[in-house]
């Protein structure tokens, strides 16, 4: 009878970031828990199932709510160049000065740490220094439905956003250097009151998890590898079927790979996305011998989740995407020392964002 490893990011121990996988023995019905981890060396802010922000502990997997689904999130190193990310009272007032009141309003953390922006006049706002080569600026806001505000970068890039009545994250991207970021009620937008929380200005061209600052820029350490501990005593990873539903295998120019390995590049079965060739890739190395290194599926869509099934139970391994065979080869995989399942490459060098609906491995026992 087979043993089955399952990991569903939506099934967490706390509903936030403590993620637990399972190994089921189908012969006995015994199910054992496996704690998932990562090699991040600092805390990280993420969004829990309840929609609130929380702090994932060192080496604790961060789960982030996206489109109503709690997904595993890996991110590279990033810096917030906004020195006062949540103390908007430190920002300079411009034009018809608004009233800024902090510490009395409920935010996405569930605490009274949001700031109220209030201005009965138009053409006023607040501004702060955020020296950046290029990248995205963002802020969480909540205002009356139909009202609007404006967010500007000194590069000339801006966005006018109409509130929907709920907390939202509003962002604007610049591809040229800029030195300040401002939030304002622009000319024609009169009598605007809204809540603000957490401004991020990063060098990346996509949104990341919030990075809190208090008077100086701050850099968040990279997530390095969503992984199991050594589970070779619970399940035979040397032969079986790996099934994973995932998207966004690459972000920010870094490769993202999913691997079964012994923790080295010598013994690994992995597939992922190659950012330089814009292809999905499959790599198989056993005993230091490269058996397969195949690129396929050019132009893989990084935003739409797909179901992948990698079967290496026979001498003719296959890989399917959404039920369609995209690779097969007449090779023999005599793996003997596989121990880990990782959402990174075998030795944890690549790190970026990866969204996973679920992961399953069925052993060939």
Image (spheres, rainbow, N blue to C red):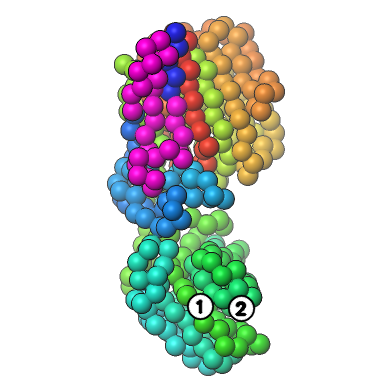
Choose between 222 and 22: the one closer to the eye: 22
Contact, mark 2 vs mark 1 (Cβ under 8 Å)? yes
Say which mark, if any, is on residue 361.
Answer: none
Q: Report the residue at 58% width, 39% height from top.
A: 247
For image coordinates 53% across by 37% down, the residue present is 357
Q: Which residue is mark 2?
A: 147
Type of secondary structure dominating the magenta stretch:
loop
Residue 326 point in image, percent of width and height = 68, 22
Disc 1 residue crowd, few under 14, some 14–19, many 20+, Cα 10 Å: some
Quadrant placement of the N terminus: top left
**Residue at 44 percent of width and 70 percent of height:** 197
**In the image, is residue 61 above or below residue 315?**
below
Element assignment for label 1: strand
Pinpoint residue 74: horizontal percent, then vertical percent: 45, 44
Q: Which residues are magenta?
A: 6-33
Q: Is residue 135 left or right of residue 306?
A: left
Circle 2 — which element?
A: loop
First in residue order: circle 2 vs circle 1:
2
> Which residue corresponds to the image point at 31% horizontal and 42% vertical from the top-left?
59
**Image quadrant containing the C terminus:** top left
- Residue 257 colored magenta? no
Instruction: Tell whether position 30 is magenta.
Output: yes
Q: Residue 111 location in percent, x, y?
A: 35, 66
**Mark 2 nearby-residue class (10 Å; few <14, some 14–19, many ≥20):** some
Toward the viewer: 32 or 337?
32
Query: Which residue, given by chain and number where applicable, does mark 1 sit on?
Result: 194
Q: Of residues 244 and 143, which is closer to you in this image?
A: 143
Q: Where does the image place residue 353, in percent across and percent down from the top left?
A: 50, 45
Quadrant of residue 220 within the rendered picture: bottom left
């Amino acid at each position: 009878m087979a043993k089955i490893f399952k990991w569903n990011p939506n099934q967490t121990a706390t509903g936030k970031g403590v993620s637990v996988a399972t190994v089921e023995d189908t012969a006995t019905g015994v199910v054992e828990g496996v704690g998932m981890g990562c090699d991040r060396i600092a805390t990280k802010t993420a969004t829990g199932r309840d929609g609130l922000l929380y702090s994932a502990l060192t080496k604790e997997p961060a789960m982030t709510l996206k489109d109503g689904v709690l997904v595993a999130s890996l991110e590279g190193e990033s810096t917030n160049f906004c020195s006062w990310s949540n103390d908007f009272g430190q920002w300079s007032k411009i034009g018809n000065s608004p009233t800024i009141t902090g510490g009395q309003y409920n935010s996405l953390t569930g605490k009274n740490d949001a700031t109220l922006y209030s201005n009965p006049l138009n053409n006023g706002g607040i501004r702060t220094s955020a020296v950046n080569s290029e990248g995205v600026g963002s802020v969480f806001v909540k205002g009356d439905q139909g009202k609007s505000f404006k967010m500007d970068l000194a590069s000339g890039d801006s966005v006018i956003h109409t509130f929907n009545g709920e907390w939202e994250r509003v962002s604007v991207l610049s591809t040229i250097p800029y030195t300040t970021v401002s939030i304002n009620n622009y000319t024609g937008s009169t009598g605007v009151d809204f809540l603000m929380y957490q401004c991020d200005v990063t060098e990346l061209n996509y949104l990341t998890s919030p990075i809190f600052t208090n008077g100086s820029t701050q850099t968040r350490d990279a997530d390095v590898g969503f992984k199991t501990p050594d589970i070779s005593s619970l399940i035979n990873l040397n032969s079986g079927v790996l099934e994973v539903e995932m998207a966004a295998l690459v972000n920010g120019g870094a490769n993202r790979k999913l691997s079964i390995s012994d923790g080295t590049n010598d013994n690994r079965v992995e597939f992922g996305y190659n950012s330089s060739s814009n292809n999905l890739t499959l790599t198989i190395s056993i005993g230091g011998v490269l058996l397969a290194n195949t690129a396929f599926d050019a132009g893989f869509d990084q935003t739409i989740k797909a179901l992948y099934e990698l079967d290496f139970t026979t001498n003719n391994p296959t890989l399917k995407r959404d039920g369609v065979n995209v690779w097969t080869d007449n090779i023999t995989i005599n793996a003997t020392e596989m121990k880990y399942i990782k959402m990174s490459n075998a030795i944890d060098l690549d790190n970026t964002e990866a969204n996973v609906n679920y992961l399953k491995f069925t052993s060939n026992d």
